[in-house]
């Protein structure tokens, strides 16, 4: 029996949505993209809050009736369900090392590169100088890690890399240059070379469906 399409509630310029879209594509899973128009508050309607995500955010997925929100939670679910032992290590230390980067994706990556980009792409009123400074502090750590290992956790890509990819690749849109981070740039190229890779739109040309 063929796999029914997994519904992805997302927004094309959202890096959080993109990390899920990228994972689905790398796993070769069929996807139905459901546009949640953040610009017009579609994520705050009673229906969305009740049936999709009470936090009022994208992304969320619906896998044959199993509705799940939060990009990192979704990555864990997809890897554990469809990853065939890749993408998420089975040993406790490996799992914990992946979790460490997922936490960093929800913390410093969010308040750094994701926020700096949000200010430029969506006009969010934030302290951009602070977001850019936080971005470089994080990128230095990532560069350091990638001078020791090919991917964030060892020699094979895991969901930690997928959680990090979108906002690092698009950091320059928030005036965060990657020029000083050669290992980071090589790592991005390594992810872009994976079979099934799909990028996020780089323009701010309004709503676009992938
Ligand atoms: N922890 C959430 C964060 C998701 C998030 O920040 N989504 C943004 C779009 S990139 C959103 O929906 N923002 C609308 C809002 O918070 O009102 C996740 O990882 O999925």
Image (cartoon, rainbow, N blue to C red):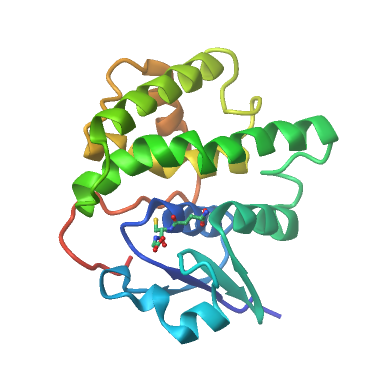
- Name which quarter of the figure residue 185 lies in: top left
Residue at image coords 54%, 59% = 24
Counting labels gives 0
Q: Quick check: can you spot residue 192? A: no
**Which residue is situated farthest in the left direction here?**
205
Nearest to the observer: residue 2 or residue 31: 31
Q: Is residue 166 left or right of residue 100?
A: left
**x, y (%) of residue 21?**
47, 59
Q: Quadrant of the N terminus?
A: bottom right
Quarter of the rendering occupied by the C terminus: bottom left
**Residue 196 horizontal side relative to residue 203, left or right:** right
- Residue 83 placement (x, y as % from top left): 70, 53
Compared to 193, does 79 lie above or below? below
Q: Residue at x 40, y 32 (%)?
A: 189
Q: Residue furthest right?
A: 91
**Residue 160 seen by the camera:** yes
| Residue 39 in the image, given as x and y percentages of width and height | 26, 69
- Residue at 61% x, 59% y is 74
Q: Residue at x 15, y 60 (%)?
A: 205
- Of residues 70 and 62, the one nearer the viewer is 70
Figure quarter occupied by ligand 1: bottom left
Q: Is residue 140 above or below residue 36?
A: above
Whole-percent x and y of residue 70?
56, 59
Task: State whether residue 114 is above or below residue 146.
Answer: below
Front-most of residues 15 and 137: 137
The residue lying toward the viewer, choosing from 35 and 112, is 112
């Amino acid at each position: 029996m063929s796999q029914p399409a997994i519904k992805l509630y997302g927004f094309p310029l959202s890096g959080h949505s993109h990390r899920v879209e990228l994972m689905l594509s790398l796993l070769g899973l069929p996807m139905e993209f459901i546009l949640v128009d953040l610009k017009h508050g579609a994520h705050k309607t009673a229906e969305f809050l009740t049936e999709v995500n009470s936090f009022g955010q994208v992304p969320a997925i619906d896998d044959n009736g199993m509705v799940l929100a939060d990009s990192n939670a979704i990555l864990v679910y997809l890897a554990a369900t469809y990853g065939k032992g890749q993408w998420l290590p089975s040993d406790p230390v490996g799992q914990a090392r992946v979790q460490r980067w997922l936490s960093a994706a929800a913390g410093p990556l969010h308040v750094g590169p994701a926020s700096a980009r949000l200010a430029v792409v969506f006009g969010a009123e934030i302290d951009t100088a602070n977001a850019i400074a936080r971005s470089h502090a994080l990128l230095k750590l990532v560069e350091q890690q990638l001078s020791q290992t090919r991917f964030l956790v060892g020699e094979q890509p895991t969901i930690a890399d997928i959680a990090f990819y979108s906002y690092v690749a698009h950091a320059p849109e928030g005036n965060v240059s990657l020029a000083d981070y050669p290992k980071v740039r090589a790592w991005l190229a390594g992810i872009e070379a994976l079979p099934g890779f799909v990028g996020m739109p780089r323009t701010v040309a309004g709503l676009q469906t992938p």
